[in-house]
Image (cartoon, grey):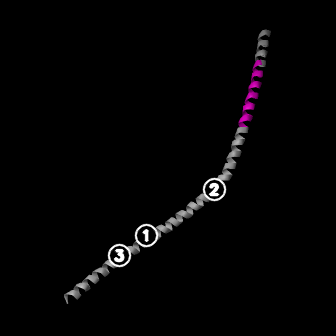
């Protein structure tokens, strides 16, 4: 019985040493990972701080340009309608002139 107790005590001692070393190893890796993570977060924050205003500015410019494009398209549509109206009036005037010309020639 005593031998079994000694064996169990030795086994527990070996196991406890192993677990202590494993814990140290895990803590070391955890600290390294935290340092890497903190660097990443810092870089991410600096990149975000640098590019967010640029993105916002580009977005604002894009919105302004889209608004201008919309206005230009409306103006183009209005001008196209005016040209169609003027062409129609021109054709009507041309027909009237032709009729008047034919009347003058026939007299």
Task: Mark 2 or mark 1: name the one nearer the start of the chain.
Answer: 2
From the viewer's perspective, tell me whether residue 40 is left or right of residue 75.
right
Q: Residue at x 67, y 46 (%)?
A: 44
Main SS class of the magenta portion in the image: helix
Whether residue 18 is in magenta: the answer is yes
Total numbered circles? 3
Q: Which residue is mark 3?
A: 87
Q: Which residue is mark 2?
A: 54
Q: Which mark is residue 102?
A: none
Q: Position of residue 4 (x, y in %)?
A: 76, 11
Q: Which image quadrant: the N terminus? A: top right
- CA separation, marks 1 and 3? 15 Å
* Residue at (49% x, 68% y) in the render: 72
Q: Is residue 15 left or right of residue 107?
A: right
Stretch in magenta: 14-34
Residue at the spot 40% in from the left edge and 75% down from the top edge = 82
Residue at 31% from the left image edge and 81% from the top image edge: 93
Task: Locate residue 86, reporting x and y percent.
Answer: 37, 77
Query: Which badge, 1 or 3, comes first in the chain's sequence?
Result: 1
Determine which residue is flagged by label 1: 77
Is 57 placed above or below 38 here?
below
- Under circle 1, the secondary element is helix
Gap between marks 2 and 1, in whole Å? 34 Å
User: Crowding at label 3, few (<14), some or many (≥20) Cα neighbours within 10 Å?
Assistant: few
How far apart are the two marked residues, 3 and 2, measured between alpha carbons?
Answer: 48 Å
């Amino acid at each position: 019985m005593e031998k079994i107790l000694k064996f169990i005590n030795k086994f527990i001692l070996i196991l406890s040493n192993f677990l202590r070393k494993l814990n140290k190893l895990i803590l070391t890796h955890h600290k390294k990972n935290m340092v890497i993570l903190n660097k990443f977060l810092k870089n991410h924050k600096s990149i975000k701080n640098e590019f967010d205003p640029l993105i916002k500015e580009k977005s604002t410019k894009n919105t302004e340009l889209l608004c201008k494009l919309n206005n230009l398209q409306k103006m183009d549509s209005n001008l196209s309608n005016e040209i169609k109206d003027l062409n129609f009036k021109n054709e009507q005037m041309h027909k009237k002139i032709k009729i008047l010309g034919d009347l003058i020639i026939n007299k």
